[in-house]
Image (cartoon, coloured by chain):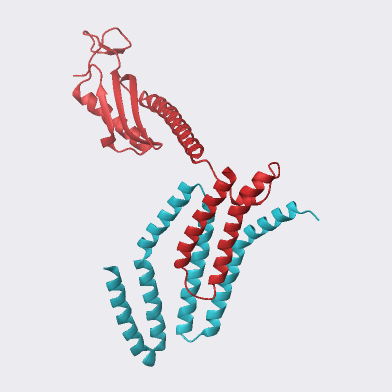
Amino acid sequence: MDIAQIVGLALVTTIMLLILRQDKPVMAVILSIVFSIIIFTFLMGKMTSILSVMSDLTRRAGINYFFLSTLLKILGVAYLAEFAAAICQDAGEQAVAKKVEFAAKIIIAVLALPIMIAILESLMELMPV
Amino acid sequence: MSVLAEIVRNVLVIIIMASFLELLLPVGTIRPFVRFAIGLFVLIAVLNPVLGYLFHDSNFQVNWWDYQIDEDIGDSIVAEGRQINERMVKQNQQMLKEKMEGQINAVILLVPGIEDVHTEAEINDGNIDRLTFTIYPEKIEISEDTGETNVFTSETEEYSSEMKQQIEKKIINVVSNMYGLGGEKIEINFEGGR
């Protein structure tokens, strides 16, 4: 009953956050970060099993593992950025949250850039000027 | 037909996996970027077999992004590599053992009262685990009238237990000083001893 534990922890954290936010907003932000880390650690094992199934499927289908690894990197960047942006927004720092999202977008673009260039160059080769 | 089959298979697997992973994506402004990257992979999955079929000779850059290693070949290469590595380690260990034994033999022969010695070293990861010595006593003759001892004569005298203890002590001392080996790792046998 993992979900029951998570829900229980979430409710307790929410109540504590409501109390803390009025008197000690800094502590509220720290509690929020700690809660995120606990949830992330808690689900790490399950995440690993999903990833191992995925990589096994990729191997059996004979698909380049590079595809999955890049996809997972992109997913990781997106998740981390969203986590961080949400925490920043909770703390009332909208500007910082926007910067984190912007950085994540750039990193995802950089990860996808070599593939885009490869496709474009191949198409250019097909249709010479 | 095989090209079509390859396209269908690749696209299907990529789309199924991408949609599953997309479910895990957080809802936010980053989502379209991730979808764009997934779209590029789908494009490669379609483009690569078609280009390969239409233009055999050309070496397009997209090929590298869809390069597949034959798993059987990969496994056999890894297995062969491991075998070669094991063989090399074994040879090196054997060479090290022989050299070490010769070196220790030479040192032990300097201990007085030893005619010959056979050393057996057990080596693990380049370290000496255990040393076994078989000591052959020096041939000595005790002349009855004078009581003098002559070395290198035909008669062989066995070691007395006191002498054995002395030789053992000297050997352990020499070996532990030279190789830092504890006395419990050294075994000494006397050939023809009492």
Query: Which residue occupies the extreme bottom position in the image?
Result: A22
Nearest the camera: B180 or A128?
A128
Left or right: where A127 falls relative to A90: right
Nearest the camera: A17 or A111?
A111
Q: Position of residue B157 (x, y in %)?
A: 23, 13
Q: Identify whether A110 is placed above or below B132.
A: below
Quadrant of the snapshot with the N terminus of chain A:
bottom left
Classify residue B165 by image quadrant: top left
- Letter of the chain in cyan: A
Q: Residue at x 34, y 83 (%)?
A: A14
Q: Residue at x 29, y 18 (%)?
A: B136
Nearest the camera: B43 or B172?
B43
Query: Which residue occupies the extreme right position in the image?
Result: A129
Identify the colour of chain B in the image: red
Q: Position of residue A21 (x, y in %)?
A: 38, 89
Q: Identify whether B135 is placed above or below B150.
A: below
Q: Position of residue B175 (x, y in %)?
A: 34, 33
Q: Position of residue A5 (x, y in %)?
A: 28, 72
Classify residue B105 by image quadrant: top left
Nearest the camera: B62 or A92?
B62
Quadrant of the snapshot with the C terminus of chain A:
bottom right
Left or right: where B129 falls relative to A93: left
